Amino acid sequence: MPTVASDPYGHLRGSEPFPVAARRSLADTQLRQNLGHATRTIRAKRAGVVAEVDDWEELRRAGEGIKADVMARLPELLVQFEEAVTARGGVVHWARDAVEANRIVVDLVRGTGAQEVVKVKSMATQETGLNEALGEAGIAALETDLAELIVQLSDDRPSHFLVPAIHRNRSEIRDIFLREMPDVDPELTDEPRLLAMAARAHLRRKFLSARVGISGVNFAVADTGTISVVESEGNGRMCLTLPDTLITVMGVEKIVPTWSDLEVFLQLLPRSSTGERMNPYTSTWSGVTPGDGPQTFHLVLLDNGRSNVLASPDGRQALHCIRCSACLNVCPVYERAGGHAYGSVYPGPIGAVLTPQLTGIQGTDDVSASLPYASTLCGACFDACPVRIDIPHLLVQQRAAAVDAHTRPTTQDVAMRAAAAAMSSPGRFSLVERALKLGRLIGRSGRIRSVPGPGAAAWFGARDMPTPPAETFRQWWARTRGPSS
């Protein structure tokens, strides 16, 4: 893992284009087996609990409508939320980007004198690279979510919203625990119950000694200043109640206007993410309560490109995302390539449209420019999305943005211009038809799998095509219908 990213957007940009990273992932048969098994299991669970809800489509439309309303008046809702949090004893900080958010949190932890913090699973702090920033400041950050702990112990990166270690199987996890976890039983097996018990014993000591907890946010209620974190293991509840100081990092889009709006998402999220009817642990808090829980509460509101997304009437749909991961679990590209291939901490279909909007596409060589092409446009992501984000439309939109960012003609541009010139003249088109017959010389078993040349190599590196027919349509027409017809 790199140290704190020099990019002000944090860990939103990868280091290589998606096709390069995906090709490496596709060659890893164990990875593909792990991903295939996990996503199939989650899909089946989700389908079962969704089928139980007669008004599922009405719930989806309600979630979509609430999110659209939030985006239309986000500034006023954030001001209302800040006032409510402050009135209840919390302290609100605003961060323009990842660097500023990390600086705020590091300074707050230093102010407590703590050398160690416990963390609830948080996509926002993954986005900013907070763990690396804390590490550089001499502060140890311990992930307490089981999957995040596995990722952290193996010096790996998350590859999924819900199951960050989805690319690992239980034998690999056992090996990681034996190698990296102190005081673990050397006879530990890969039985899931025993793995969970080993992690629980390791974490319990940290929970009882931690002075600072750090969390993300699933939802925040504007009119009461309430923050909600939902989870399945209970580690979040421990982080949110035992430390003296709680620091929460929240993307500004996580707002809902009222408690009744929250009801809708607490039905949509568990069914779409874990395939459960409700979350085992739903924690809510508003500021500070004397004698109960943390006595100091800081909230860091993170922009980090979200204002750029909000400015797009269509693109702002991406901010509706509730991080359920349903689109990842149904995506044929994600299932085969895995989350690491996307580079960004936000993988899968939603990441392919959210990341380029958060960071912008900075010219031809920007690695984010390849993300919108990491899709078959099959539409499964829209069907699965609990808030009806039209991801296929946004993918096409971002592909257009990637094309517009080109500062010089690409091989594809040259090819399309050549095709336009050939098709605009019957004579030239006829010559091209005749020339295409040469393709029969390089096709094997009826398929062309490679052609010399840099542009052709890029094209055929990911696809093949049938060899041209022995006879063109015009020749067939002339032979069967005659020149006069």
Image (spheres, helix red, strand yellow):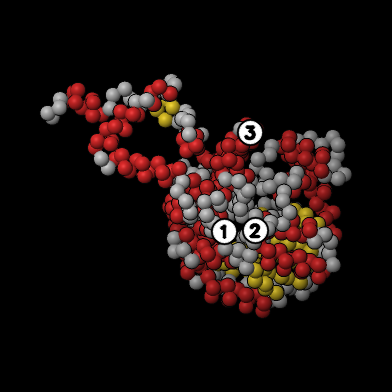
Element under label 1?
Answer: helix
Q: How crowded is mark 3: few (under 14 residues within 10 Å), some or many (20 or more)?
A: few
Dot 3 amino acid type: Asp
Judge by depth and name the residue closer to the eye, 121 or 404.
404
Asked whether disc 2 touches disc 1, contact meaning CB atoms under 8 Å apart, the reply is yes
Disc 3 from disc 2: Cα separation:
29 Å
Dot 2 amino acid type: Asp
Q: How crowded is mark 1: few (under 14 residues within 10 Å), some or many (20 or more)?
A: many
Residue behind mark 1: 359
Judge by depth and name the residue closer to the eye, 454 or 113.
454
Q: Within the image, what quadrant is residue 217 found in?
A: bottom right
Q: From the top left corner, tell me how far across and down residue 339 is, in percent.
A: 61, 45
Judge by depth and name the residue closer to the eye, 102 or 434.
434
Residue drawn 38% across the image and 23% down it:
440
Residue 55 in sight: no
Of badges 3 and 1, nearer the viewer stands 1
Q: In this view, does 476 lie above or below 423?
A: above
Q: From the top left corner, tell me how far across and down residue 165 is, in percent.
A: 68, 44
Number of marks drawn = 3
Q: Earlier in the sequence, mark 2 or mark 1?
A: 2
Q: Which of marks 3 and 2 is nearer the N terminus?
A: 2
Residue drawn 50% across the image and 49% down it:
372
Of badges 3 and 2, nearer the viewer stands 2
Residue drawn 36% across the image and 44% down it:
417
Q: Which numbered disc covers residue 28? A: 3
Element under label 3?
Answer: loop
